[in-house]
Image (spheres, rainbow, N blue to C red):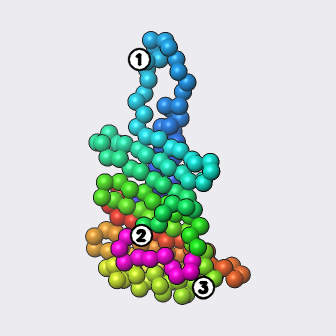
Amino acid sequence: MARPSFAARLAALAGASLAIAACSAGGADDSADATDNEIEPRGSYDIDRATGETRARYTADDGTTTTMRSGENVPVALPADFTVFPGAKVTNNTRVEQADGLLVLLALESEAEPETMIAHYRAQAEAAGIDVAMALESGATQMIGGEAPDGTSFSFTATREDDLTEAQLSIGRGLE
């Protein structure tokens, strides 16, 4: 059975959070019917207008809480063995946490060539015990990916346009 991609899961989480927040965002109603029919909110979704940071929180029936922070200024905290490519600018950072599970999705810009960035992240992934079993190249885009025995998944994609490489790093483990 194919598992949905981390991007699909992230989109579903954000959408579910937005729907939940919309359900609980109604105005005050003093009638008895309103209190009898109110739905207890299971999550929240908020966008900071000053920074553009998005925050979402959702609690499942079993009590498991999933949180998400996404934005250019969200502090970067990568799993052990991984670093931001030297000199790269983080243009977006999405972090999803659930119990012991984690997904980090970084968008980067760098003047470095994709091959140089790929080599950097391949070495870090292998040092983290990830079997980098996939490598693709299509035009200006290059991608590598793999998985560790503990279920940690990894992918790195880099696309060169003019004098700039735009890249995306994804590291995830333990999200249901």
Q: Residue at x 61, y 79 (%)?
A: 110
In the rendered image, the vertical position of residue 21 relative to residue 55, given as above or below: above
122 left or right of 152?
right
Q: Which residue is mark 1?
A: 36
Characterize the local packing of mark 2: few (<14), some (14-19) or many (20 or more) Cα atoms within 10 angstroms.
some
**Residue found farthest to the top:** 32
Q: Give the main secondary structure of the magenta stretch.
A: loop
Toward the viewer: 143 or 101? 101
| Residue at figure coordinates x 43%, y 83% from the top left | 122
First in residue order: circle 3 vs circle 1: 1
Span shown in magenta: 79-88
- Number of numbered markers: 3
On the question of residue 137 being in view, the answer is no
Vertical placement of residue 79 versus 120, above or below:
above
Q: Position of residue 152 (x, y in %)?
A: 34, 69
**Quadrant assignment, res 99:** bottom left
Name the kind of residue labelled 1 in the image: Asp
**Residue 26 painted magenta:** no
Give the x, y percent position of residue 139. 64, 81
Above or below 34: residue 58: below
- Give the CA separation, mark 2 to mark 3: 21 Å
Q: Which mark is residue 78?
A: 2
Q: Residue at x 41, y 85 (%)?
A: 123
Instruction: Give the percent coordinates (x, y) of residue 121.
Output: 46, 81
| Residue 40 can be seen in this image | yes
Left or right of residue 32: residue 164: right
Between discs 2 and 3, the one toward the N terminus:
2
